[in-house]
Amino acid sequence: MNITIKYFASIRETIGLPSESLHTGAATLADLRDALIARGGAHAESLARGRAVRMALNQVMSDESVALVEGAEVAFFPPVTGG
């Protein structure tokens, strides 16, 4: 499925991208996060397990167990972001 990923605040700064389009076989937000971590580098650093990362699916705060859907917009951001 095709999704759009948006990165915010310190995650965006570390990864160096505000957003990206991705074709993925991930079924859930957790699967997507793990796939991005597996890329290594900045993705692994900013999304690593043990780091506090909030997620939203189609602009709704979501738990990692939420299923992805075709055309979804996924956002990753730290628990506190500034104005």
Image (cartoon, rainbow, N blue to C red):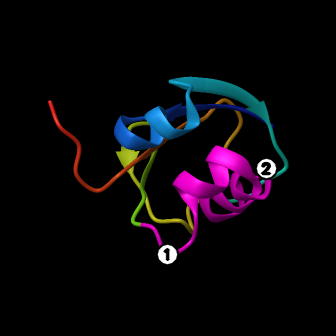
Locate the C terminus and report the quarter of the image it occupies.
Answer: top left
Q: Position of residue 3 (x, y in %)?
A: 68, 32
Left or right placement of residue 34 versus residue 4 in this view = right
Quarter residue 70 falls in: top right
- Residue type at numbered disc 1: Gly
Q: Secondary structure at mark 2?
A: loop
Front residue of 80 and 72: 80
**Labelled disc at residue 2:** none
**Labelled disc at residue 50:** 1
Between disc 2 and disc 1, whose residue precedes?
Answer: 2
In this picture, which residue range is highlighted in magenta?
A: 29-51
- 1 up-or-down from 27: above or below: above
Q: Position of residue 9 (x, y in %)?
A: 35, 37
Q: Secondary structure at mark 1?
A: loop
Residue 68 visible in image? no
Q: Position of residue 63 (x, y in %)?
A: 46, 65
User: What's the residue at 75%, 32% (across, down)?
Assistant: 22
Secondary structure that dominates the magenta span: helix
Residue found farthest to the bottom: 50
- Residue type at numbered disc 2: Arg
**Labelled disc at residue 39:** 2
Q: Is residue 36 magenta?
A: yes
Q: Is residue 74 magenta?
A: no
Tag 2–tag 1 contact (CB < 8 Å): no
- 6 up-or-down from 10: above or below: above
User: What's the residue at 78%, 58% (across, down)?
Assistant: 38
User: What's the residue at 59%, 56% (across, down)?
Assistant: 45
Residue found farthest to the left: 83
Locate the N terminus and report the quarter of the image it occupies.
Answer: top right
Residue 18 visible in image? yes
Left or right placement of residue 23 versus residue 58 in this view = right
- The CA span between labels 2 and 1 is 17 Å
